Image (tube, helix red, strand yellow):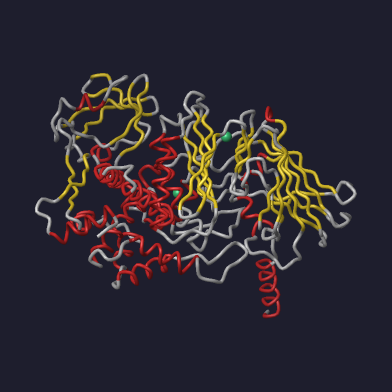
Amino acid sequence: MPGWRHVALLVIFLLATVETSGRATDETASPPLQLEYHLVLTHPNLHLVTVEITAGKVSGDSLDFVMPAWSPGRYAIYDFAKNVQEFEAGGAQGQALPWTNLDKQTWHVDARQAGGIVKARYRVFANDLNGSFSQFDYSHANLNGPSIFMYIAGHKSDPLTLAVDAPKDWKLISAFSESTAERTFQAPDYDRLVDTPIEASAEIKLAQFQEQGKTIRIAVHDYDQDDTDTTKLLEGLKKIVHVEMALMPAPDFERYTFIFHFAHDISVGDGMEHLNSTQIILRGSLSSSLDEALETAAHEFFHIWNVKRLRPVELGPFYYTREVYTPSLWFAEGVTTYVGYLSLLRSGLWTREQFLARLSDEIRALEEEPGRTLVSAESSSFHAWFYDRSPQMQETNFVDSTISYYNKGALLGMLLDLEMLSRTEGAKSLLDVLSSLYQRFYETPPATYYGPGRGYTEQDILEALNEVAGSDFTPFFDSYVRGTAPLPYGRALGMAGLTLRISVAEGSPPRIGITALPENRGLRVFTVRPGGAADRAGLGRDDLLIAVDQQSLAGADLNEHLKAYRPGAIVPFTVERHGRQQIINLNLEPPIPDSYSIQELPGATPQQTAIRNRWLTGRN
Ligand SMILES: [Zn+2]
Ligand SMILES: [Zn+2]
């Protein structure tokens, strides 16, 4: 029945093209609305933020108000709608308008009786100091747009105004404002609204400096009242910004804003990149976390080029209601980490030894991951939605089955940089590839409502490498980016007259290949290294190791016990599973090399030394 088939195809076509709230990245041609957002920060005790969205020039029969499920920069579904309450909608005369929930994050408002104006009002519970969430309490409001602001389906590209009601003595800082007294802002579209975090507090300290004619502003909120000297932070940031601005083409902003938080009572810190600002949140105080603050700043500031402007094709404009998948986070995040390290070295904040030691740590981290033979850099990026601070309701073995695209991406950055320097005899580096991509994909028209340029694909990275080098990087990509071949550290470092030394620390005991957590009666196995002694003997996760050779392991250090034996010894372990005990004999294995260091090759050639100096200093 071809006719029926035709109808079915037509239905599928309509379903695919009709814009539903959860599906829209591209904006429809419907006439723009006149949008005013109003944010009310008046009741901090309940951590409730009030949002009012007034849409004027409404001509359609309905409007869908949509709460994002995630926040760009953190690849995890958080469902911000779960903290929305008391939604209501009214029309031009204040009359209530009927609405229904289409799904967990979409409020469908019937606008037929609206009189051209729809006003939505809701409250959001916000009590997390974090780069993706928001917090409103007596000390401040720290707001990340996607967790607070709904958009109207089909109208993300419409310009809008934001007005904020906050206590009079609070200073407001965001990439929107010049003065901390400003309370009304203009945003060209919804994407920019939510890419502009806002900090409002009476407690923030402010500073600024100039670099290449751009104003760099710093806001510091340090909960440690005795520790508010920002001098060292400011000095370090000046050096980082100076070095990174010299690495890449000048960015298209007049002002950039660092928003720092230092708090003792948070469980974990965070850093989050935005178009013209960043949120850096650290555990501890300004002085205790200064090094970490500068390291994070070196990473986040480089994101103004890599990911916020030069971006994977999947990352902007965004679907806010579901995952967007990209294979390129190894480049967007890992290479950013690598360039951050390079900037810390070249700014003088790190010594050459610190830089090489950090790269050695990265190598060690990857080499100790069993997942490095299972998962490629591209695959790890694609599946970020599983790992990037996602809530885990189900037990996983990620520790054995995955890698970090930050970690492997940083190492790929190092290898590509050395390979590029070597192939071009020091004339070109990875930074030339980044600049070339930036010019080709960000600075070249056509622009969209979202901003200049377009996104890149993995193939575009490869082609830029090939063009800058004048030779083919396809085998490198196939083996190390798309594939899981062991990374060629020795070859790459050798080109710069360096070598990787891997050794066993003196006095290391034999191993059985597990990690375990101490419990009252013994050690609870947490991970078992595939192919190791414990794996071969059949030990598994959650086994409780009660004793070794009849000596209790309650409160014990397993390594101390194992020092009594030689590799190859067969040792009986008392193991408890589901309340039943048994003896399992383990054949101890030699200690694993766990000391990694990058050292200078004795007798390096002048060519090798020249590449090394070019790499480390950026100068010939
Ligand atoms: Zn604050
Ligand atoms: Zn990052």
| 520 relative to 437, above or below | above
| 527 relative to 604, above or below | above
Q: 611 or 464, which is in the foreground?
A: 611
Q: Position of residue 578 (x, y in %)?
A: 40, 28
Q: Position of residue 155 (x, y in %)?
A: 70, 59
Quadrant in which residue 414 is drawn = bottom left
| 161 relative to 32, above or below | above
Asked if residue 415 lies left or right of residue 179, the reply is: left
| 306 relative to 282, above or below | below
Q: Position of residue 409 (x, y in %)?
A: 36, 53
User: Residue, x 50% and y 45% (percent of image)?
Assistant: 272
Q: Quadrant of the C terminus?
A: bottom left
Q: 482 or 603, which is in the foreground?
A: 603
Q: Position of residue 619 (x, y in %)?
A: 27, 58
Asked if residue 186 lies left or right of residue 231, the reply is: right
User: Residue, x 74% and y 45% (percent of image)?
Assistant: 38
